Image (cartoon, rainbow, N blue to C red):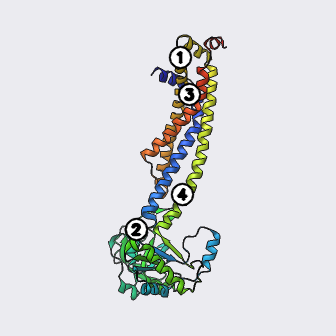
């Protein structure tokens, strides 16, 4: 306790110098807390919400997962997926339990003088409500007969409801899409937005209506669920791949002329991207911690020189080498721990501000806070070890003579 008291007095004597010494540790720990909380929050969001595919559902698209410019240019040359492809998969795939079809376009919605631009219009089959895990707050989704007869009806997102209807109940009312009236039959539960993708500014219309209204030249997206669920996922993927390759007369050994995406594949790609960004920022914050440690070591060496006579007096009065060593180690660790506490607080503040000011989910856990504080303690210990050893090894007589 006496060692801690002396360390606190020494640090309070030079408040400004102590604060400036802490900046490197504060920045390093703050960066670690903020970045890890953001990455953890995004990973959890991606897993639970952003990609609404069930684990036992996979998607067949013209593009697939694009990770480079070359892949994008190659995908542009592929044949579009059309209704005949969807019918062929439904007819020929013996292991498929459910096959859904979707197409999309951005259009303007209007209602009694109100206008909402760049709304995502999804033309789908009736089973897409289940395949995409759509959660309805009110009303219903359309059925197969309404898809076949191109019924003029729509299921809207919560932002569309707020912008066009305000406090009114939208069910049974009309909205206009590109000059045509659509009756609102359902309202989706609010899902939020992240990474620039607003999941509430979209609507769903029957696929037949979509193709009648916006044309038939858009490439479709197929959603497939195996009859045996997860157990039959690989078998069904192989069967669908064979059907699609046969329809495009793809040579043996050639790449698939389409993209096949599963929830696991999307999550794996996301984790690769987030892991790369995480490693880069952690490396940068690690440099900040190293610089902070060097600054602490330098200041502690200066402190040893400034307090040489004090060390000599304490040694003359009976202080042992380990007492002096503990004193300076305690000062270095407390100095670094103070920076760690400030860094944790700032990191949590940044995380809180980002999650409330932007559609960016964050997650600060007790374990993350403990790691941040441990990093600061370890940095202080290693930074203070050499100065503490140097102070402990001073000869009492020479220390008393020091001017």
- Residue at image mark 2: 158
The residue tagged with tag 1: helix, strand or loop?
A: loop
- Locate the N terminus by quadrant: top left
The residue tagged with tag 4: helix, strand or loop?
A: helix
Q: Residue at x 55, y 19 (%)?
A: 321
Please state which of the two labelled residues, at mark 4 or mark 2, is closer to the viewer.
4
Please state which of the two labelled residues, at mark 2 or mark 1, is closer to the viewer.
1
- Residue at image mark 4: 274
Measure the C-alpha gap from mark 1 to mark 3: 28 Å
| Crowding near the residue tagged with mark 4, few <14, some 14–19, many ≥20 C-alpha atoms within 10 Å | some
- Locate the C terminus by quadrant: top right
Measure the C-alpha gap from mark 4 to mark 2: 29 Å
Place of residue 45 in the rendered image (x, y in percent of width and height, measured from the top left)? 45, 60
Q: Please give left or right for residue 309 compared with residue 212 in the image.
A: right
- The earlier-in-sequence mark between 2 and 1 is 2
| Crowding near the residue tagged with mark 1, few <14, some 14–19, many ≥20 C-alpha atoms within 10 Å | few
Measure the C-alpha gap from mark 4 to mark 3: 39 Å
Measure the C-alpha gap from mark 4 to mark 1: 51 Å
Viewer-nearest residue: 229 or 261: 229
Place of residue 198 in the rendered image (x, y in percent of width and height, measured from the top left)? 48, 66
Residue 320: assigned label:
1
- Residue at image mark 3: 15
Please state which of the two labelled residues, at mark 1 or mark 3, is closer to the viewer.
1
Q: Please give left or right for residue 277 compared with residue 172 in the image.
A: right
Q: Residue at x 48, y 24 (%)?
A: 4
């Amino acid at each position: 306790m006496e060692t801690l008291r002396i360390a606190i007095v020494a640090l309070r004597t030079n408040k400004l110098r102590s604060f400036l010494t802490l900046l490197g540790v504060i920045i390093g720990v703050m960066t670690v807390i903020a970045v890890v909380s953001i990455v953890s929050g995004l990973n959890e969001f991606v897993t639970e919400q952003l990609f609404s595919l069930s684990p036992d559902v996979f998607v067949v698209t013209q593009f697939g997962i694009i990770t480079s410019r070359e892949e994008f240019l190659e995908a542009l040359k592929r044949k579009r997926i059309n209704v005949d492809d969807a019918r062929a998969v439904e007819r020929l795939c013996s292991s498929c339990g459910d096959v859904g079809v979707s197409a999309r376009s951005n259009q303007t919605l209007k209602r009694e003088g109100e206008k909402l631009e760049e709304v995502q219009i999804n033309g789908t089959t009736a089973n897409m409500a289940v395949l995409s895990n759509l959660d309805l707050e009110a009303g219903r989704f359309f059925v197969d007969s309404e898809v076949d007869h191109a019924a003029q009806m729509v299921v809207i997102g919560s932002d569309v409801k707020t912008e066009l209807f305000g406090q009114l109940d939208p069910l049974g009312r009309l909205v206009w899409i590109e000059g045509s009236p659509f009756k609102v039959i359902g309202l989706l539960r609010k899902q939020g937005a992240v990474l620039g993708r607003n999941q509430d500014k979209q609507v769903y219309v029957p696929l037949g209506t979509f193709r009648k209204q916006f044309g038939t030249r858009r490439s479709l997206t197929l959603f497939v669920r195996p009859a045996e669920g997860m157990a039959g996922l690989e078998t069904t993927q192989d069967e669908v791949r064979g059907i699609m390759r046969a329809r495009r007369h793809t040579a043996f050994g050639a790449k698939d002329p389409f993209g096949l995406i599963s929830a696991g594949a999307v999550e794996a790609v996301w984790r690769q991207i987030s892991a790369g960004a995480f490693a880069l920022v952690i490396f940068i914050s690690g440099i900040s911690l190293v610089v902070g440690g060097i600054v602490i070591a330098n200041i502690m060496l200066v402190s040893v020189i400034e307090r040489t006579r004090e060390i000599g007096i304490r040694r003359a009065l009976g202080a042992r080498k380990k007492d002096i060593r503990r004193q300076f180690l305690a000062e270095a660790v407390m100095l670094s721990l103070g920076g760690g506490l400030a860094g944790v607080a700032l990191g949590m503040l940044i995380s809180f501000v980002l999650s409330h000011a932007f559609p960016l989910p964050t997650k600060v856990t007790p374990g993350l806070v403990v790691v941040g504080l441990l990093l600061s303690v370890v940095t202080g210990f290693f930074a203070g070890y050499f100065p503490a050893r140097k102070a402990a090894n001073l000869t009492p007589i020479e220390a008393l003579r020091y001017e």
